[in-house]
Image (spheres, grey):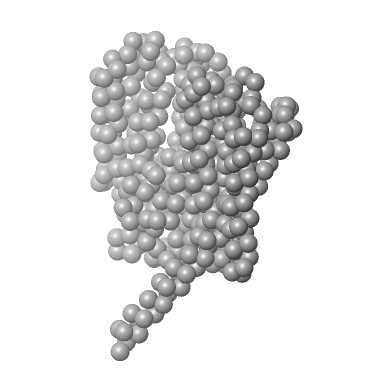
């Protein structure tokens, strides 16, 4: 089986599992719905204010919700020693990593697509800048979160209280990415300044950490 | 080895007392800021020491990943721990100085944010080491250290985009510093480096001993079980 054949097979398996169980997506949806409602309720912002704060709120909600999907990425493979089977199989480790990262990317993107309309309704959002630029920002930002998230989920697999460990490892490293996403989104919503610099920063972050993950994943997978 | 350690301890004690005298009494008082400026002699050397220790941690982590040498792993652990302590000193002394001079405790300025993010990354590194149950903790930790190092330039550029408020670097940043003050600063840095070295050395020996004890205990229980 070729590299991408393995990636495709693992990805299809994960998507099918999620499609049938809907474990992660339901928890993520409900969690981010709660965040939207609670923040909207406690701030009750005007249209002008919400343009300033929505960028931060949206991404914090997605970040916390994404942890749910990321945490179950590898935990699912611990049952019946599936991860050990992966280790002894001749399949390249990076094919597995890419499949897991792409799977998480799909789950979080679906979440974002479903939640964005709700954000627009609750926060009376109307972008003053070029709206189409939000698409590359969302794609780059989501990838930035899930690529490192998938990697650190593999690291935190072998720790006590691993569900708490993942955010502790992921958040400090993700600070530049978060800054990029939030500032780019705010720049577009308020129409003040350009989002170009932040998009370039997100591209750099994605390139650097995707390469780092692919270089080091085998080491982490073999470390048992 | 033992004698070297005692000599280093004495040199550190002497240097630290001399540096304390120089910083608090001998150094000239700054014209606009007054005595509050003297915190500079602790703030800046701590920052340099912390960054140096984090750099050593990164190098040791890379060496460990390549050679799987236990000594490199212990060095990485020790420098991260001591580095976090010095970084904490920086983060505490900074606001104490900033409040009377800038009128605010904290601002999201380039160097402040970078130091805080570094502190967060290395705390998470130590948390990982503490919570990991696998025998492969050193591998996972050194991978995390490399990720942290990769993050630094990205954090730098992301905050560089904002206007920066921190006084520009005194050495090599076009700032002018009274030669007397620079002298005191360097003495303090030398004292802090000696102190960091001393603490790292002690911690290194302790860690080696701890691992030996652990190994001996594991061996002992193994023998008990087989009897």
Q: Position of residue B149 (x, y in %)?
A: 57, 46
Along the viewing direction, whichever of A29 and A155 lies nearer the viewer: A155
- Residue, x 61% and y 40% (percent of image)? B21
Q: Residue furthest bottom?
A: B227
- Which corner quadrant of the image does residue B162 belong to? top right
Is residue B200 positioned above or below B115 on the image? below
Q: Is residue A93 visible?
A: no
Is residue B121 positioned above or below A7 on the image? above
- Residue, x 48% and y 64% (percent of image)? B207
Q: Position of residue B200 (x, y in %)?
A: 55, 57
- Which corner quadrant of the image does residue B114 belong to? top right
Which quarter of the rendering shows the C terminus of chain A? bottom left
Along the viewing direction, whichever of A32 and B40 lies nearer the viewer: B40
- Residue, x 50% and y 60% (percent of image)? B203
Q: Position of residue A14 (x, y in %)?
A: 36, 49
- Which corner quadrant of the image does residue A48 belong to? top left
Count the marks: 0
Q: Position of residue A209 (x, y in %)?
A: 54, 44
- Residue, x 38% and y 26% (percent of image)? A58
Q: Is residue B138 visible?
A: yes
Is residue A192 positioned above or below B214 on the image? above
């Amino acid at each position: 089986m070729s590299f991408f054949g393995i990636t495709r097979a693992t990805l299809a398996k994960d998507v099918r599992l999620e499609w049938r169980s809907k474990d992660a997506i339901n928890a993520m949806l409900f969690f981010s719905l709660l965040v939207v409602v609670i923040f909207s309720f406690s701030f009750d912002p005007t249209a002008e204010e919400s343009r300033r704060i929505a960028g931060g709120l949206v991404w914090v909600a997605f970040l916390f919700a994404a942890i749910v999907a990321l945490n179950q990425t590898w935990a699912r493979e611990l049952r019946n020693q599936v991860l050990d089977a992966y280790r002894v199989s001749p399949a390249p480790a990076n094919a597995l990593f890419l499949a897991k990262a792409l799977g998480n990317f799909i789950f979080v993107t679906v979440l974002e697509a479903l939640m964005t309309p709700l954000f627009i309704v609750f926060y009376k959002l109307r972008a003053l800048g070029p709206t189409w630029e939000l698409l590359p920002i969302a794609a780059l930002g989501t990838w930035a979160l899930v690529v490192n998230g998938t990697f650190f989920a593999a690291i935190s697999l072998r720790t006590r209280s691993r569900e708490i460990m993942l955010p502790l490892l992921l958040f400090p490293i993700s600070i530049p990415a978060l800054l990029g996403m939030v500032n780019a989104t705010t720049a577009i919503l308020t129409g003040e300044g350009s989002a170009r610099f932040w998009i370039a920063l997100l591209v750099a972050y994605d390139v650097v950490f995707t390469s780092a993950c692919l270089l080091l994943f085998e080491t982490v997978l073999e470390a048992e | 080895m033992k004698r070297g350690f005692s000599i280093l301890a004495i040199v550190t004690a002497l240097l630290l007392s001399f540096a304390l005298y120089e910083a608090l009494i001998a150094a000239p008082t700054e014209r606009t800021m007054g005595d509050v400026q003297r915190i500079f002699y602790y703030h800046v050397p701590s920052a340099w020491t912390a960054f140096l220790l984090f750099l050593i941690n990164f190098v040791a982590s890379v060496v460990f990943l390549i050679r799987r040498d236990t000594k490199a792993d212990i060095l990485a652990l020790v420098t991260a721990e001591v580095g976090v302590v010095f970084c904490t000193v920086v983060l505490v002394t900074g606001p104490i100085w900033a409040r009377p001079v800038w009128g605010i405790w904290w601002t999201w300025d380039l160097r402040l944010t970078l130091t805080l993010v570094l502190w967060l990354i290395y705390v998470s590194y130590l948390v990982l080491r503490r919570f990991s149950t696998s025998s492969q903790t050193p591998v996972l930790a050194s991978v995390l250290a490399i990720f942290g190092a990769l993050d630094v330039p990205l954090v730098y550029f992301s905050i560089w985009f904002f206007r920066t408020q921190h006084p520009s670097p005194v050495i090599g940043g076009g700032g002018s510093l009274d030669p007397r003050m620079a002298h005191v600063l360097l003495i303090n840095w030398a004292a802090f480096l000696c102190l960091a070295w001393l603490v790292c050395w002690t911690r290194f020996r302790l860690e080696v001993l701890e691992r030996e004890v652990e190994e001996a205990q594991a061996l002992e229980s193994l023998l008990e079980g087989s009897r």
